[in-house]
Each structure stands twice: as structure tokens, then as C-alpha cells.
Amino acid sequence: MAMKRLVLPAAVAVLLLSAVAAAQHKEPAPGSIWWAKRQSVTVENFVVAGLILDIGGGGEGVIGQLKGQQVVAIDINRLELANAPAGPLLKVVMDARDLGFLDGSFATATVFFTFMYIAPADHEKVFRELHRVLAPGGRLLIWDVLFPRMEDKQKTTAVFPFTFKLPDREVKTGYGVRFPEGEQGLAHFVELAHETGFTVAAKNGAQEWFFLELVRPADEVGKIAK
């Protein structure tokens, strides 16, 4: 399948390739990168009561920029959190596979373009932990990339440039990551949602990204996904 390389300004391209190298701990081989077209994502100022747990809240910290002091941002990477913009109430170094919060601590959780950096084998662990720390009736909001079906085996790395449109600003960035083993599309996450006790409230796949809104059923008082 032929892929068209995205032509970016030199400075932007260098930054994206640096991000890829950092994520992979080495420079990608020549000709190994597949470039997505730049995607525009409108991030609405969603209404939520109480605190928001933001998984992978380092880096651009988009949810922290959007919701400010309502956000408890966690990230496994201390440097990513340290460099994230001001906004969240708390920034905590933590592994999403083993959340250090009590059951039912949050009414809302967000995972903003972070699952792509978590090994697919660990996705179920993260879903179960999110189910546990969400209160019954709580919402889980997920944004992430849609990897293309890659027939060219030389393409081992994908780069996704994005423009995130917040109500009062735009954030331009890009994510570089190795192609995952097997499928990692919207169906993968919907299946995980059902397996871990969530119901699907909304889903939308657009070009190379998707949005998924999940709910922990309100009648699950005292019940934790196992």
C-alpha cells in the first residue's frame, strides 16, 4: 500500500523525529517511518463535577490545559510531567497499570493520546485499574490514534502530527511510536471496555484518530472488575 510522506517545515520535522528517537531510545532507520497527514482535533470544554484523573498527563498536558485545577495528572515519565504546562492541581509520577488511588476516587478519567505508548498486552490492566478508581456512574474519555493496516514491513514507526483546538488556544504537536503488534483499532478498545465492565456511551473514528466515551454502570456499587 503506497503511503505519501507528509511534508513539514524543517523545524517541525526535526522535533517529531527527535520525539520518535526518544520513544524508541534510538534513531529510526532510513525509510522506516510512515507519516500520517496532520489531523485537526477539536477538544471541547466538557462539563464534569469533581476531579479528573488524567492518564499520561505529561508532555503537552492538553487535559490539564483545558480543565486546570480539576485535573490530577499522572505519568510514568517524571521528565514529561516536569515539562508539562502549568494547570493541573497535582502532577504525580505513577504507573497506570497500578494506580495508587482508592476505589471509586474519581468521577471522570481521561486518556489523551497515551494508549499508543502502552504495550497492547498491558491495556487490559489499565482498563481494570481505571474501572476500579472510577465511581459507579463515572466516565472514561479516551482519545487515541488509529494505526493503518501496514503492508510495507519496512515501515516500523508511525508519526502522527496533530493540531488540538481548545476553546482558547491551539496546540500543535506530533507523536512518534513503533507500530504495535496486531490490530489496535477502535474495535480493540470497545472489546476491552466490554470485558472490563464498561458500557460504551459514544464513539467516533475520524481519519487517523478516534474518541471513545465509556461509563462504569451506576448500578455497580461495591462491584470491581476482576
Image (cartoon, rainbow, N blue to C red):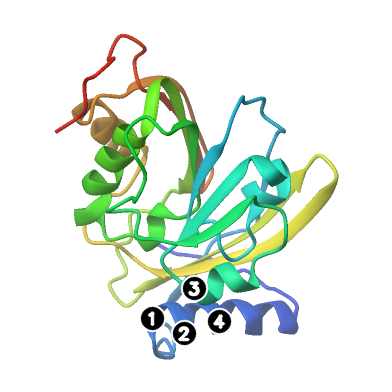
Q: Are marks 2 and 1 in contact (CB under 8 Å)?
A: yes
Q: Which element type, helix, strand or loop, lies under badge 1? A: helix
Closer to the eye: label 1 or 3 = 3
Closer to the eye: label 2 or 3 = 3
Q: Quadrant of the C terminus?
A: top left
Q: Residues within 10 Å of mark 2 (few under 14, many from 20)?
A: some
On residue 21, which mark appears? 2
Q: Are marks 4 and 2 in contact (CB under 8 Å)?
A: yes
**Is residue 100 among the parts visible in the rendering?**
yes
Mark 2 to mark 1 CA distance (whole Å): 5 Å
Mark 4 to mark 2 CA distance (whole Å): 6 Å
- Residue 41, given in percent of the width and then of the height, sits at 66, 44
Closer to the eye: label 3 or 4 = 3
Q: Which element type, helix, strand or loop, lies under badge 3? A: helix
On residue 17, which mark appears? 4
Q: Is residue 109 above or below residue 121?
A: above
Q: Which element type, helix, strand or loop, lies under badge 4? A: helix
Q: Quadrant of the N terminus?
A: bottom left
Q: Amino acid at mark 1?
A: Gln
Q: Earlier in the sequence, mark 3 or mark 4?
A: 4
Residue matched to label 1: 24
Q: Earlier in the sequence, mark 2 or mark 3?
A: 2
Mark 1 to mark 4 CA distance (whole Å): 11 Å
At 55% across and 48% down in the image, what residue appears? 72
> Residue 105's quadrant in the figure?
top left
Closer to the eye: label 1 or 4 = 1
Mark 2 to mark 3 CA distance (whole Å): 18 Å
**Is residue 5 among the parts visible in the rendering?**
no
Q: Amino acid at mark 4?
A: Leu
Q: Amino acid at mark 3?
A: Arg
